[in-house]
Every structure is written in C-alpha cells, then in structure tokens.
C-alpha cells in the first residue's frame, strides 16, 4: 500500500503517530510535504520506517540536529532536507545508506567537517552541502564518488585547496565551490571534466592564472570565476566554449586585452569583466553576441571608442562601461538597443553632445553620463523616457537651459544636473516629478527664483541648489517637503526672511543658508525646533547674517548660516571639499 503524506508536523508528538499500523501504511516509498510548513525536530523514530526510499522535507522550518538513526534507512535513495534551520554536524553514519543517490542538506546551519565517510556512497549522484557553516578542507576521498553528477559545497567556510582527486569525477555536470576559502590556483585538471555544464568557483580566494585548458570544456554553459585574486591575461581559448551562456570573470586582477575570440561565443547572454585591469579597446567582435543581455566592462583601463558594433546587440538590457578611459562621442547606434534599461557610461573622457537618439530608448530606467567632457544642450527627447528612474548628467560641460518638457519623467527619483554650465531659470515643471528623492542643480549658472512648485515634491530628501546665483525669497512651500533631509541654498543671492514653514521639516538634518542676503532674525518656530534636538532655547542673530561666524550643531539638526562645513554623501557629483568647520572658517574671513 502506498501513502503520500501532505501534512507533517514535527513537534514531539511523533511517537504516538508511529504505531505499527502507521508504519505498515508507509511501506510504499514516499514521505513528503508539499502543502504545509513542517516545524520542530526530525524524530529519530523515522528510522523505524525501514521501507522508506524518498524523504522530502525541503524548505520548511526544521530545527535541531539530523538524527544519526536515519542511517538505518538502508533503502533510502533520496533525502531532501535543504532550506531548513538544522544545526549540528553531518552524521558520518550516512555512509550506511548505500542506496542513496540524492543527498541535499544545503541552506541550513550545519557546522563541522564534511565527513570523509560520504565517499562510501558509491551510488551518490547529487550531493548538496552548500550554504552552511562547514569548515575544514574538502576530503580527498570525495574523488571516489565516480557516479557524481552534481557536487555543491559552496558558500561554506572551507579552507585548503581544490583536491586533485576530483579529476576522477568524469561524469560531473555541475561543480559548485564558490564563496569558500580555497587560496590555491584553478586546477588544470578541470579542463578534463568534459561533461561540465556549470563551474562555479567565484569568491573563493583563488589565485594565479586562468588555465587555458578550460577552453576544452565544450559543454560548459556557466563559468563563474568572479571575486578572486586571479591575474594574467584572459585565455583566448575561452572563445572555444561555444555553448557558454554566462561568463563572469569580474573583480580580479586580470590584465591585457579582451580576447577578440569572445566574439565566437554566440550563445552568450551575460558577460561580466568589470573591476579588473583590462586595457586596449573594446573588441568590435562583441557585436556578434546577438543574444547578449548584460555586458559589464566597467572599472578597467579600456580606451578608445565605444565600439559602434555594440549597436547590433538588440537583446541588450544592461550596458556598463563606466570608469574607463573611453573617449570620442557616444555612438548613435545605441538607438538600436530598444530593450536597454541601464546605460552607465560615467567617469570616462567622452566628448561631443548627448545623442538625441537616446530618447528612443523607451525602456531605459537608469542613465549615468556624469564626469565626462560632454558639451552642448540636453536633448529634449530625453523627456520621452517615461520609465527613467535615475538621470545623472553632472560634472560635464553641458550648457543651455534645463528643458521644460519633463512631464513624462514621472518615474524619476534621481535628477542630478550639478557642476555644468546650465543657464536660465529652474523650470517650474520640475515640480511635476512627484517621485523625485534627490534634486541636484548646484554649481551652474542658473538664476531667478526658486520655483514654489518644488514644494510639491513630496518624496524629496535632498535639495541642493547652492552656488547658482538664485535670487528672490525662499518659498514657504518648501515647508511641505516632509521627508527632506538636506536643504542646501548657500552661495546665492537669496533675500528676505527664513520662512516659518521650515519648522515643519521634522526630518531635516542639514540646512545650509550661508553667503546669501537673508535678513531678520531666526523665526521663533525654528528656535523651538532647535531646542527639541538639544540646541539653544533662545537664538538671536544680527539683522544681516553674512560673514558672521556662529555655528550651531545640535545632534539631529544642523543649520549653517555662515560657515563652510561641508558634507559628502558619497555621490561624486556632490563633492564639497573640506569637511572640518574649524579648517574652513578662516576662508570666510
């Protein structure tokens, strides 16, 4: 008789359930839980189910140790205990389950060494021990598991090197040793594991060079060697792995050119080479990778043109080329990348104008062009990018006025145009960008008043309008910005009084107003705000504040009327210079 269990609660009441009648009912082969979450400990009485062949308790809330009595289930073929909260060590007695071919214990809190006795499970094909707290070295004896198809020991605290004995696992399809501590070299014998489809060695402190023998793995589809200490050049033989779908060599110390042979990897969908020391130009042959979805070559020393052949990659969604030495113009062929969501080109030496063709990339969510040498005006076509979340154009030589037609950018959260040569007024239409959290226009040549419509930006946290020659008064509508953290209006020509409405800005931590033409006293309402956070209970100032040297620094709110204390939130477009007030004050004399 066969019995399939759908509701299983391990809460200490199992002894009453495991009657001889219940045990006989389970002589069929399956004990699994597909409907409800199982809690509690695994009862050692399970060992009484002598005919059990399949035990699946994957993805539950089991706690405690794995009872060694399970090893008495000599007919067990499949044991799935992954994604629980099991602790303790892996029972060496598992070696008595000689029929076992599938053992999954990953994503628990198991500790201790990997038992060398597991090598006795000669029928074992699938061994998953990843994402635990296992220590020690990988047992050489695991090389005896000649039937193994998948071996996952990654995301543990394993040390030592990759044992040479693994060369015997000729049937291996997946080898996962990433996120461990194996500071040896990438073994050359891996190139002889001809059945490999997945080789995951990322984040394992590996060093040395990439062996050219990896190019013999013609069935390989996924190669992960990211975040190691690998050096030398990228072997051109990797271009022979014609079935490769994902290649990640990022965050190493690789140098030299990107092999043009990569253009033969026509099945490639993801290519990550970022954060290395790669040089030379972007190979035009990458334009042959018509299935490519993500290309990240950022943080290298690449130079020359952005290969216009990249415009043939019509499936591309992510293009990261930032922090290189790329120059000349942004190729207009980028307009063909209709699925592009992320275009990140900042920190290069790009020149010329922003192509108006970028306005046709209607799926674009992030556009970073900051810290280049771009000039000209902002194309009005960028206003068509209705899905754009983050637009950062700062630290260039852009000029002209800020376009008025931004009504389509309703998804935008970051609007960063600082450190350019923009002129004209701040468009009142910016008040329609209801989701904006950061608005940076500082260090431009703008003029005129602060639009009161900016008070409609309910999600705004950072408003930086300093050093742009603004005039008029501070709009009282800014008091509506209830989420505002930083308000920087210093070094302008603002006049009049500080509006009482600013007292309602309960999240405000930094208020910069120095070097303006403000007059009057600090509002009593602002005085109350200061006293709540530890500031003085009575605050008075001269009629004109310019060139005074008073500075208050309450724990939660800082108001700077004439100092030069600076802040730097890590955004390169927000660099402000010195951060020490005492060092900065002499500059104001």
Image (spheres, rainbow, N blue to C red):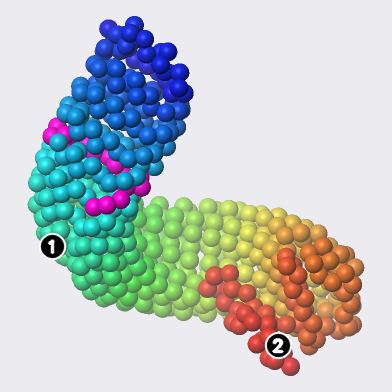
Quadrant showing the N terminus: top left
- Residue drawn at point x = 52 percent, y = 73 percent: 572
The residue that mark 1 highlights is: 212
Q: Position of residue 79 (x, y in %)?
A: 28, 29
- The foreground one among 141 and 413 is 141
- State the extent of the magenta-drawn residues as a range: 121-137
- Residue under label 2, please give it: 585
**577 shown above or below 358:** below
Judging from the image, what secondary structure is the residue with disc 1 in? helix
Q: Is the magenta stretch mostly helix, strand or loop?
A: loop
Neighbour tally class for label 2: few under 14, some 14-19, many 20 plus, Cα within 10 Å:
some
The residue lying at 64 percent from left, 82 percent from top is 580
- Would you call the spot at circle 1 few (<14 residues within 10 Å), some (14-19), or many (20 or more)? some
Q: Distance between the residues labelled 1 and 2?
A: 60 Å
Name which quarter of the figure residue 425 lies in. Answer: bottom right
Residue at the (29%, 42%) spot, across then down: 129
**Mark 1–mark 2 contact, CB under 8 Å?**
no
Residue 261: quadrant of the picture: bottom left
């Amino acid at each position: 008789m066969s019995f399939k269990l759908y509701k299983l609660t391990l809460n200490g009441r199992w002894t009453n359930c495991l009657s001889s009648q219940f045990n006989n009912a389970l002589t069929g082969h399956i004990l699994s839980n597909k409907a409800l979450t199982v809690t509690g400990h695994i009862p050692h009485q399970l060992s009484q189910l002598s005919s059990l062949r399949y035990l699946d308790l994957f993805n539950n809330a089991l706690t405690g140790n794995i009872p060694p009595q399970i090893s008495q289930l000599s007919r067990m073929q499949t044991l799935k205990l992954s994604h629980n909260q099991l602790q303790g060590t892996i029972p060496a007695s598992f070696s008595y389950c000689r029929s076992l071919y599938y053992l999954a214990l990953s994503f628990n809190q198991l500790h201790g060494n990997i038992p060398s006795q597991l090598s006795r499970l000669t029928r074992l094909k699938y061994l998953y021990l990843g994402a635990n707290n296992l220590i020690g070295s990988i047992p050489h004896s695991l090389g005896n598991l000649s039937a193994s198809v998948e071996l996952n020991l990654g995301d543990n605290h394993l040390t030592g090197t990759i044992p040479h004995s693994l060369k015997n696992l000729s049937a291996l399809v997946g080898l996962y040793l990433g996120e461990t501590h194996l500071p040896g070299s990438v073994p050359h014998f891996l190139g002889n594991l001809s059945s490999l489809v997945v080789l995951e060695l990322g984040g394992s402190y590996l060093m040395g060079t990439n062996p050219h023998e990896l190019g013999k793995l013609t069935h390989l589809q996924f190669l992960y060697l990211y975040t190691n200490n690998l050096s030398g050049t990228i072997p051109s033989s990797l271009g022979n792995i014609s079935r490769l779908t994902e290649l990640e060599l990022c965050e190493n110390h690789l140098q030299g050119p990107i092999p043009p042979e990569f253009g033969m990897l026509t099945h490639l969908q993801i290519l990550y080479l970022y954060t290395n020391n790669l040089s030379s130009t972007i190979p035009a042959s990458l334009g042959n990778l018509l299935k490519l979805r993500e290309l990240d070559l950022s943080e290298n020393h690449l130079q020359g043109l952005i290969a216009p052949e990249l415009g043939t990659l019509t499936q591309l969604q992510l293009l990261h080329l930032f922090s290189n030495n790329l120059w000349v113009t942004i190729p207009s062929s980028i307009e063909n990348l209709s699925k592009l969501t992320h275009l990140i080109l900042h920190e290069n030496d790009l020149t010329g104008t922003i192509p108006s063709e970028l306005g046709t990339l209607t799926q674009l969510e992030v556009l970073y062009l900051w810290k280049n040498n771009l000039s000209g005006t902002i194309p009005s076509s960028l206003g068509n990018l209705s899905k754009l979340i983050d637009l950062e154009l700062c630290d260039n030589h852009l000029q002209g006025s800020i376009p008025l037609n931004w009504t389509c950018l309703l998804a935008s959260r970051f609007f960063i145009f600082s450190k350019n040569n923009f002129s004209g007024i701040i468009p009142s239409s910016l008040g329609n960008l209801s989701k904006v959290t950061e608005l940076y226009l500082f260090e431009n040549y703008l003029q005129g008043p602060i639009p009161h419509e900016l008070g409609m930006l309910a999600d705004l946290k950072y408003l930086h309008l300093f050093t742009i020659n603004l005039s008029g008064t501070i709009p009282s509508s800014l008091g509506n910005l209830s989420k505002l953290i930083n308000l920087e209006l210093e070094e302008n020509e603002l006049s009049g009084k500080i509006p009482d409405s600013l007292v309602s800005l309960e999240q405000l931590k930094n208020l910069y107003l120095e070097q303006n033409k403000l007059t009057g006293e600090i509002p009593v309402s602002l005085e109350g705000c200061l006293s709540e956070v530890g500031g003085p209970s009575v605050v008075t100032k001269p009629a004109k504040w310019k060139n005074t040297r008073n500075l208050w620094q309450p724990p939660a709110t800082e108001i700077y009327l004439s100092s030069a204390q600076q802040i730097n939130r890590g955004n390169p477009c927000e660099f402000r210079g010195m951060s020490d007030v005492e060092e900065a004050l002499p500059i104001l004399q």
